Amino acid sequence: MSNTTAGVTLLDGGMGQELVARGVAGSETLWSAAALLDAPEEVLAVHRDYIEAGADVITTNSYAAGRDRLEKVGVGHLFEQLNRTAGELAVRAREETHRPVRIAGSLGPLRGTFNPDAVGAFEELVPLYAEQAELLLPHVDLFLCETMSTAEEARAALTAAAATGREVWVSWTLAEEGEAGALRDGSGIAAALAAVADLPVAAVLVNCVQPERITAAMAALVDSGRPAGGFANGFVGIPDGWVVTDGLPDARNDLDAAAYAGHAIGWVDQGAQIVGGCCEVGPAHIRRLREQLDVLGST
């Protein structure tokens, strides 16, 4: 963990929605990975802006660059190129800004976000995550297994990432309704934590859900005894069974930079040591959060 202000590590914000906000055409199938081909300089600019906003960690734009996802849309041959490019752009942003940020290699869901029924078996997932991790390895300081919707999905990603010898973090996404702390498959955060208890996990987080749901789950994460945190999205809510072809949910109109920072500082008050942002959370939000963390560190 970094020795950041108030003992809190600040992550960056979202990549895909930030690219859309900058006029980069989205892709229902490749999502933000399309920009690695069509607009790499914009990806670089987003990384730079997060660094300049005060992030301690930036995340590679490899979330949607798993082999399974690429092969389903006929571009599996680009798998190596896209992941190497994602890593190289993050490194270049760090070099150009001259700030010693850490780079997290993003390992996301291989068979669809928020879709626990499509996750697949542990034995199928581990080699797929392993080959992606190996491509990112030369460029990253740690791996972030993010937006995991089941305990098994997280365990597979972590197993592959840990085999590289790099530090590994895990972040689950949560259901929008029902029991606080429930994953998208309905299991609880306690069961998810237990499923990875024997793995060398350096941090446990939740992400890509409304900030209020993260607030409700934070105590369980902190009680795990591992560094804990969260990075929320700014959507009105993502319903169960959602797929990308349904179109993205609307953005909330009550989560400007100040309001979002208020939620995140609340997590810090609960004991979180890592905070940042996901979809619809941009550089302005991260800058405001940096300012708030600096205030905490000076008191």
Image (cartoon, rainbow, N blue to C red):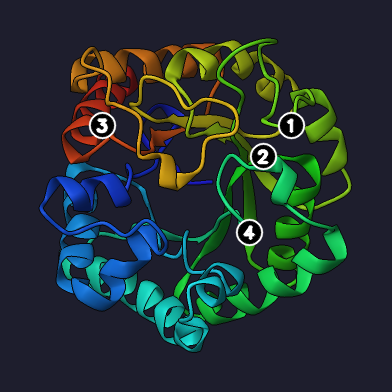
Q: Which residue is mark 2?
A: 149
> Three-letter amino acid code at disc 4?
Glu
Q: Nearer the viewer, mark 1 or mark 4?
A: 1
Kindly identify which numbered label has been placed on residue 290.
3
- Callout 3: SS: helix
Q: Which residue is mark 1?
A: 185
- Give the total of numbered labels: 4
Q: Amino acid at mark 2?
A: Ser
First in sequence: mark 2 or mark 3? 2
The percent position of residue 28, horizontal first and vertical second, equals 37, 56
Q: Of 172 and 113, which appears nearest the observer?
A: 113
Position of 150 with respect to 77 (left or right) is: right
Distance from disc 2 to disc 3, alpha carbons, whole Å, reads: 29 Å
SS for callout 2:
loop
Q: Is residue 124 left or right of residue 145?
A: right
Q: Is residue 172 depicted above or below 155 in this figure?
A: above
Residue 167: give its label: 4
Label 1: element kind: loop
Q: Is residue 155 visible?
A: yes
Residues marked 2 and 1 touching at CB (< 8 Å): yes
